Image (spheres, helix red, strand yellow):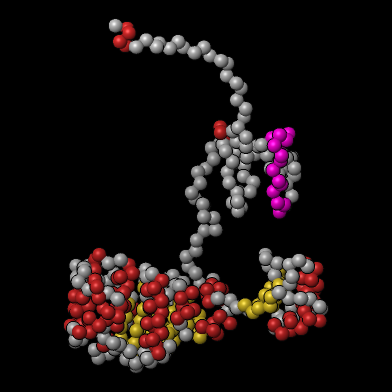
Amino acid sequence: MIEAVGLTKRYGDKTAVYNLSFQVRPGSVTGFLGPNGSGKSTTMRMILGLDNPSSGQVTIGGYPYRKLPNAPRQVGALLDAKAVHGGRTARNHLLSLAQLSGIPARRVDEVLGVVGLQDVARRRSKGFSLGMGQRLGIAGALLGDPQVLLFDEPVNGLDPEGILWVRNLMKSLAAEGRTVFVSSHLMSEMALTADHLIVIGRGQLLADMSVQDFIAANSAGFARVRTPDTEPELREKLSTALAEAGGHVLPEQDGALRVTGLPLPRISDIAHDTDVRLWELSPHQASLEEAYMRMTQGAVDYRSTADQKAGLQQPLPPGAQPPMPVPGQGQPGWYAPPSPQQGGQPFAMPQGQPPQGPYGAPAAPGAAPAAPAAPGAAEANPYAQPPTPPAAPATAPAVDTTKPEDAR
């Protein structure tokens, strides 16, 4: 078991971790979550004795890491998959770690088979891909068959098969009664892998609970209700009845209703009492990602700008007007008409004139495009090439049919 009590780490005037206390128990996968710069890597380094805490302490099995007898046989860790001598082969890298820890050489071949690198065991690691490097790092963590394992972003660079393998590996290790502590930014993967969560923000503990409790505490479930699309009056009737019963009803873009404040059996009873048929009545709960974003939104240090093009656009010259917006640009099915030089029409509409449909009629919002006109109709095609006047007949030059031998 890993236990931190009042753990604090300062670098000069910056406090990376402050008064952090938690326990990582054996028999389950514990996820370690937090925004960039929240102190996760610093905490893991203090657990492994790579950094000394400014105050507080962290122990593994009741001992600081540096006082554990033959620590590599008891604790395995993957913090940086690139921390490998590139000139060594995968097998020699693991063999050097094994010799330093008194681990027999046969164990090297065993873990190479576990991580799937037996076929490249004699290749130098500098030629490894990111995913192969991650597998080699995991092999190093498993080398001593330890009871405590720490992984920092273990699925980084792995393909889907590799991600599934790591997920099953961590679950199987925890099922054997080992302590598994995993840091990751992939919320979807943590939702499938972790049993318990420790969440920190700006160096302080935000949550220490199971995944289910974390989602329930940081999100609100809702019921999704759908009535027949062909009878919109039923939707309005049901919305009114649900609101009168104390529910909060919000329409969704596809015509369904999102209902909070009422349990599903109560919604079903109300629909029955108001004689409204239901096409759907299903419970919905927020994902781990949504719950995590809601909890940590105030602890994020690095945010992107709202305008993705901010700072990239060139300033307009003095007196120049900004370009006119293109109607419909960015909508599904939109495409740019030919340029005016190719016979197309300018984008700008006349001032004061409403947007028109493809054949001159005012375009109604959401209306389907009109059927094409019959051949010979008077409507002009806005994208048609301008008629070219017939060229004046030119006098054809005389053709000399005299053969070379006749000229002689």
Q: Main secondary structure of the magenta part?
A: loop
Residue in the picture at 18% in, 78% down: 96
Residue in the picture at 18% in, 83% down: 105
Residue in the picture at 81% in, 72% down: 237
Image coordinates of residue 273 in percent, x first then y, are 81, 81
Q: Nearer the viewer, residue 141 or 198?
A: 141
Q: Is residue 371 magenta?
A: yes
Image coordinates of residue 299 in percent, x first then y, are 51, 72
Image coordinates of residue 120 in percent, x first then y, are 24, 71
Q: Is residue 312 magenta?
A: no
Q: Where 363 falls versus 390 (above or below)? A: below
Quadrant, the C terminus: top left
- Residue 5 visible in the displayed image: no
Q: Locate residue 272: give its quadrant.
A: bottom right
- Residue 324 visible in the displayed image: yes
Image coordinates of residue 109 in percent, x first then y, are 22, 81
Q: Where 333 falls versus 399 (above or below)? A: below
- Count up the numbered dots: 0
Quadrant, the N terminus: bottom left
Lateral position of residue 356 relative to residue 313, left or right: right
Lateral position of residue 261 relative to residue 64, left or right: right
Name the residue at the top extreme: 408
Q: Which residues are magenta?
A: 366-380
Name the residue at the front extreme: 406
Lateral position of residue 275 relative to residue 316, left or right: right
Q: Nearer the viewer, residue 15 or 186?
A: 186
Q: Nearer the viewer, residue 391 or 155?
A: 391
Q: Where 105 falls versus 39 (above or below)? A: below
Residue in the picture at 50% in, 63% down: 303
Q: Locate residue 10: give its quadrant.
A: bottom left
